[in-house]
Amino acid sequence: MPPRQDSFAGTVSDLTVLYLAAFPRTPTKGQQSLSDRIRRALSWMNRAAAVSHEDRPPRYVDLWIALNALYGQRYYGIGSETKGKDYKDFQEFVHSLAQINRAGAELKRWIGKRHVQGRIRHLVENQFLYVEYWEGKTDALAGAIKHQSEGLERAFRNHQAGQALELLFNRLIALRNQIVHGSASADTRRNKDALVPGILILEELLPLLVTLLIEHGRGRPWPDVPYPGIRTPLHTPPR
């Protein structure tokens, strides 16, 4: 196993131990949403850690699902009522986390790291992650990248971790769509410029978010977890 992959696997293992020590095996109704989100995220992070370092698309998808497990809210319908909810849900999740003093400070510290900023810039400046590129709208593409890049630099200067993460999220979800909607081939060598920084940033961001939730998330309201396990406190059986 390559050193980076081995390191990520070790991080996930350590976080799992930390999680099991912090949360009861059978959570209460008030604990379940946070507990289930962390547990589910760790399960997908563990799966991602087992995927070959070179098998980038499934590794990225597993990491994305782990992220989605943390921020996703309940939408059991289909169609227009669920469309476009991802960004709003992620925004609310980051806002809730940033409101916790210690967690907010850690997010700002992480966003301030030079290598993190470099990877986020790389994704925000990647023309292939903008719909305007695929629609052949050259001027609109240049304007969109300029607007997003300026917003990102402003967020970096002002230590606005939430804004920086939201701009990152826009590019990560574009990459997710290209893969899971069948808009790229399985080997996706042409997506390497987006997949590599996308994977690297998620391999750092996810452990940070999970750690912050374990250490500071308890005792705070979190949206009900989607699809709670049968016979768990948040499950409402049919009548």
Image (tube, rainbow, N blue to C red):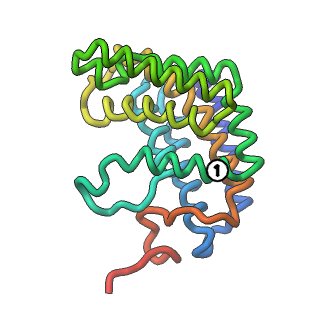
Task: Answer with the quarter of the image where residue 37 lies.
Answer: bottom right
Q: Which residue is the site of mark 1?
A: 97
Near-viewer residue (239 or 161): 161
Q: Is residue 181 left or right of residue 234?
A: left
The x and y percentages for residue 44 are 50, 45
In the rendered image, which quarter is residue 13 located in? top right
Identify the residue shown where x is 51% and y is 31%: 168
User: In terms of secondary structure, where does tag 1 sit?
Assistant: helix
What residue is shown at x 35% (from left), y 18% (from top)?
A: 128
Q: Position of residue 1 (x, y in %)?
A: 58, 25
The answer to whether one can see residue 32 in this image is yes
Task: From the viewer's side, name the closer residue of 190 and 95.
Answer: 95
Q: Residues within 10 Å of mark 1 (few under 14, many from 20)?
A: many
Q: Is residue 21 above or below residue 148?
A: below
Residue 190 horizontal/vertical position (percent)? 34, 14
Against 85, residue 105 (above or below) is above
Identify the residue shown where x is 50% and y is 32%.
Answer: 167
On screen, residue 19 versus residue 186, left or right, reads right
Q: Is residue 221 left or right of residue 80?
A: right
In the rendering, at what x and y percent does residue 164 appear? Answer: 57, 32
Quadrant in which the C terminus is drawn: bottom left
120, 95: nearer the viewer:
95
Name which residue type carries label 1.
Leu
